Image (cartoon, rainbow, N blue to C red):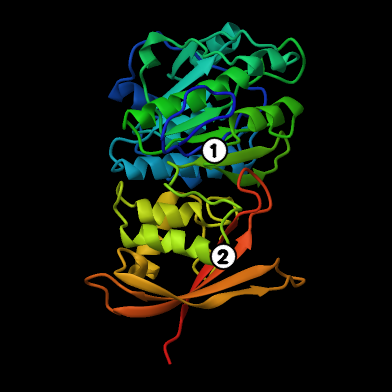
Amino acid sequence: MARVVANPWRTRAAVVLVLAAAALALHSLRDGSTPTEARLEAAAGNGPCRPYRKVVEKAIVQPNPPQLRKDQLLRIAGSVHAASEARGGDSGARLLVFGVGFDSGVWAAVNCKGRTVFLEHNAIWLGKATKKRDLEAYLVSYRGDVGKPEEFFAKPWLMEVPAAIEDACWDVILVDAPTGYKAGLPGRMESTFYAVSTARRCIEANEVEEVTIYLHDAQRPVEKQIIAELLTADDIKPLGELPGKHGLLSGFKNVESCQVPPSPQFNAEQAVRVQLDALAANNQPWPQHGIQTAYEWAVDVGGLDPSLYFGFPKDLYHFDHFLGMFANKLPELVNLQSYDILGNAQELPATDDSPPTWVVRARVVGGAGVAQPSAEFEFQLRRKTVGARKGALMTHMIRRVAQQ
C-alpha cells in the first residue's frame, strides 16, 4: 500500500515521486481559464516544439539563466519528455510547477504540447512574470511557517488551490516554491504535501499511472524533515541527489507496492523465490506485477546513477525503462512455467570494490513462445543499506549462465 508518513490517506497507489523545489524564483498569474492550444503555442514561442536538450542548452546561456544547474534541468525536462512520450507524444505532459522564475520558459517550451500550470504566492512576482510570457498561473496562499514546521507535521493540512485545477492530475510536479530560507516564510511543507496527496488521488482514480515530483534545496534542515515525514515509506525509492550551486536536487520514486515487498526477514533463496513466483504469473493480480516485483526487489534501480542490474551500466531511472529491458533481456523469466533453485545460496565476502554478495542460481523453464525454453540464471543479491528497506537482501544483478 502506497503511503506517506504522517499522511492519513492510504492507497494502493502507483506513484513515482521525484521531488524538486528550486531556490527563490519569480512567479506568474493566469485568469483561471483552461489553456487553449493558442496559449500553449504562445508559451512555447509560437513555433514547433524543440528537443528538450536544446531548450535547456539555450536557457543556460541567457543573461538571466535558471538557478537550477544544467544537469538538474535536464533531469526534470527528461521526466516531462518521458511522460509526454508515455501519453503518445501528441498531447504532451501535464506539468504542475510551484513557483515561476527564469526557468519558466524552459518548462513551457519543454512541454509545448501539454498543459503547464504555475502556482505562486507573491502577487508582485506574478505580475512581473505575466508581462513577459503568456502562462497559465494562479495566485495561492500558505498558512505554514518554516520556523515552526512541527505545527504542520503534527497534523498536515491540504492547501487550497484554484477551482480550475482542483480535480486536475499531473504527470510531473516541480515544487519550486514557496520561499523557505528563514523563519516567517511559508516553506515547502504544504506544497510538497499537496503534490504527494494529489499524486495519490489521481493514481487511486486510475487517471495517471505514475507521477514524478522534484524537490530542490533538499540540503536544508526543513527540507530534510519534509523528506523524513512525507517521503519515507516502504514503497518509496530514493532516486539519489544532484548537487547545484543554488541547492541540492533530491529525488524519490514510488510505484504501486508489489504484493510481497522486500524485507530483512527473507534470506537470499527466499528473496529469489518471491521474485520468480511473481514472474510466473506476470499479469496477476494486475498487469506487469511480476516485472514490477523484480523492480521493487532491485537494490539500485530507479536512481540517478546507472544500474548494473542487467550486467552492464544502464539508466533504469523510470520503471518503463526497466520494464522494456527486462522483457527484452530476460524473456524466459516472464510468465515462466517452472523453476528449480540449484544448491544453496553462496555468500561472497566484501572486497575493496563491492559489499558482501549472496549468489543464488536457478534453472527456469520459460513460457510459451520463448526462443530458449530452458535457461539458467544467477541472482546476485546485496543488502539495502539505507531507507525503509534497510537490511533487506535485494537483487543487484541477474546474469544468464552460459549453457555447457
Residue 268 is labelled as 2
The quarter of the displayed image where residue 294 is located? bottom left
| Residue at the extreme bottom of the image, as rendered | 404
Other-residue count near label 2 (Cα within 10 Å), few / some / many at <14 / 14–19 / ≥20: many
Residue 271 horizontal/vertical position (percent): 51, 61
Of the pair 96 and 345, the residue shown nearer to us: 345
Residue at (37%, 75%) from the top-left corner? 364
Residue 51 horizontal/vertical position (percent): 43, 45
Q: Is residue 50 visible?
A: no
> Viewed as shown, does residue 62 lie left or right of 167?
right
Quadrant location of the N terminus?
top left
State whether residue 183 is above or below residue 299.
above
Mark 1–mark 2 distance (CA, rounded to whole Å): 30 Å
State whether residue 121 is above or below residue 297.
above
Of the pair 300 and 87, the residue shown nearer to us: 300
Other-residue count near label 1 (Cα within 10 Å), few / some / many at <14 / 14–19 / ≥20: many
Provide the secondary structure element on which disc 1 rests. loop
Residue 18 is labelled as 1
> Viewed as shown, does residue 374 lie left or right of 343?
left
Provide the secondary structure element on which disc 2 rests. helix
Residue at (61%, 53%) from the top-left corner? 264
Quadrant location of the C terminus?
bottom left
Residue type beneath disc 2: Ala
Of the pair 266 and 350, the residue shown nearer to us: 266
Residue 101 horizontal/vertical position (percent): 58, 24
Return the disc, 1 or 2, that comes first in the chain's sequence: 1
Count of marks overlaid on the render: 2
Residue type beneath disc 1: Val
State whether residue 402 is above or below residue 320.
below
> Viewed as shown, does residue 191 lie left or right of 400?
right
Residue at (54%, 44%) from the top-left corner? 75
Residue 206 is labelled as none
